[in-house]
């Protein structure tokens, strides 16, 4: 039985942030590394560059599309893996389960060919962008504006006795700070989505996936690949 991989997102970087002053010809800010495998990525993995990560709308669109093609439709995909029960008049008076269990080999093949690779791709994207967010970014186009705002704020005379709100100052975030916040939030979303998906998978497994959590099962698959 053949299983289709999640739809390839070939144009995911088409809306990436345009190169900024100080970027090289590929839009990679100086001092920030491209992904080591960016030239040989799979069809489902976008070309990982700092420009891709800094375009946080593109990053979130990729994650949203990937989740929609696997996790959000997990019940429908699992339904295609099990045959509908044959009619048996002797069982019509008994309560039937609301879903059909999937043969272990069939379910394992689906997890290994479709679900886990999709999770792996999103993990790799978020890990790379987290590394980008942790690197110095001297070419941030908003750096001069942020520095000027901080200088102006530092020169202000603040007297909270006259104005309790005069000491409040919310500096503009640099693009690495914005990216770090997006990655942190998306990792939280990812954990929730995988937990929900795994509950569905366990409900269709003949042995409840041996009581494994999604993290344990996913880690086993990764270890088998290495």
Image (cartoon, rainbow, N blue to C red):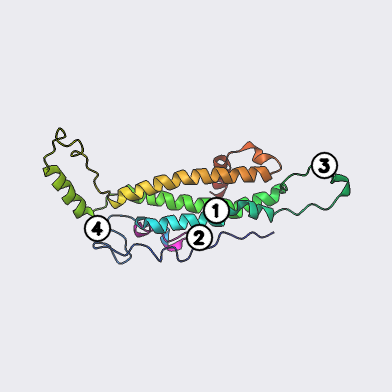
Q: Are marks 2 and 3 in contact (CB under 8 Å)?
A: no
Image spot of residue 102 (x, y percent)? 71, 49
Residue annotated with mark 2: 44
Disc with the residue nearer the chain's start (2 vs 1): 2
The numbered mark, 4 or 2, whose residue comes first in the sequence reads: 2
Frontmost of labels 4 and 1 is 4
In this rendering, position of residue 112 left or right of residue 28: right
Is 200 positioned to the left or the right of 149 in the image? Answer: right
The residue that label 1 is drawn on is 117
Disc 3 vs disc 1: which is toward the camera? Answer: 3
Q: Which of the numbered marks, if any, corresponds to residue 94?
A: 3
Q: Earlier in the sequence, mark 3 or mark 1?
A: 3
Which SS class for mark 1? helix
Single out the residue that lies furthest toward the top: 161
The answer to whether residue 49 is magenta is: yes
* Mark 3 nearby-residue class (10 Å; few <14, some 14–19, many ≥20): few
Q: Secondary structure of the magenta portion, mostly?
A: loop
Q: Quadrant of the N terminus?
A: bottom right
Local secondary structure at mark 2: loop
Q: Secondary structure at mark 4?
A: loop
> Label 4 vs label 1: CA separation?
35 Å
Crowding around mark 2 (Cα neighbors within 10 Å: few <14, some 14 to 19, many 20+) is some
**Region rendered in magenta:** 39-52
What is the distance, in whole Å, between disc 2 and disc 1 at their CAs?
Answer: 9 Å
Please give the label number shown on residue 141: 4
* Label located before the other in sequence (2 or 3): 2
Query: Pointers 2 and 1 in contact (CB under 8 A)?
Result: yes
Snapshot quadrant of residue 97: top right
């Amino acid at each position: 039985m053949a299983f289709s991989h999640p739809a390839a997102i070939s144009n995911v970087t088409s809306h990436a942030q345009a190169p900024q002053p100080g970027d090289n010809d590929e839009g990679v800010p100086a001092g920030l590394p491209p992904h080591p495998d960016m030239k040989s990525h799979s069809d489902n993995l976008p070309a990982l560059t700092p420009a891709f990560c800094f375009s946080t709308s593109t990053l979130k669109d990729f994650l949203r599309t990937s989740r929609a093609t696997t996790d959000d439709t997990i019940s429908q995909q699992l339904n295609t893996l099990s045959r509908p029960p044959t009619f048996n008049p002797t069982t019509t008076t008994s309560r039937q389960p609301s879903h059909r269990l999937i043969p272990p080999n069939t379910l394992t093949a689906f997890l290994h060919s479709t679900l886990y690779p999709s999770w792996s791709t999103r993990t790799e994207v978020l890990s790379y962008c987290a590394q980008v967010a942790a690197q110095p970014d001297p070419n941030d186009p908003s750096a001069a504006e942020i520095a000027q705002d901080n200088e102006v704020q530092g020169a202000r005379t603040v007297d909270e006795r006259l104005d309790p709100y005069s000491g409040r100052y919310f500096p503009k975030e640099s693009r690495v700070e914005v990216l770090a916040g997006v990655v942190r939030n998306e990792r939280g979303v990812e954990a929730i989505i995988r937990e929900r998906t795994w509950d569905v998978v366990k409900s269709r497994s003949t042995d409840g996936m041996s009581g494994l959590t999604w993290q344990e099962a996913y880690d086993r698959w990764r270890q088998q690949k290495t």
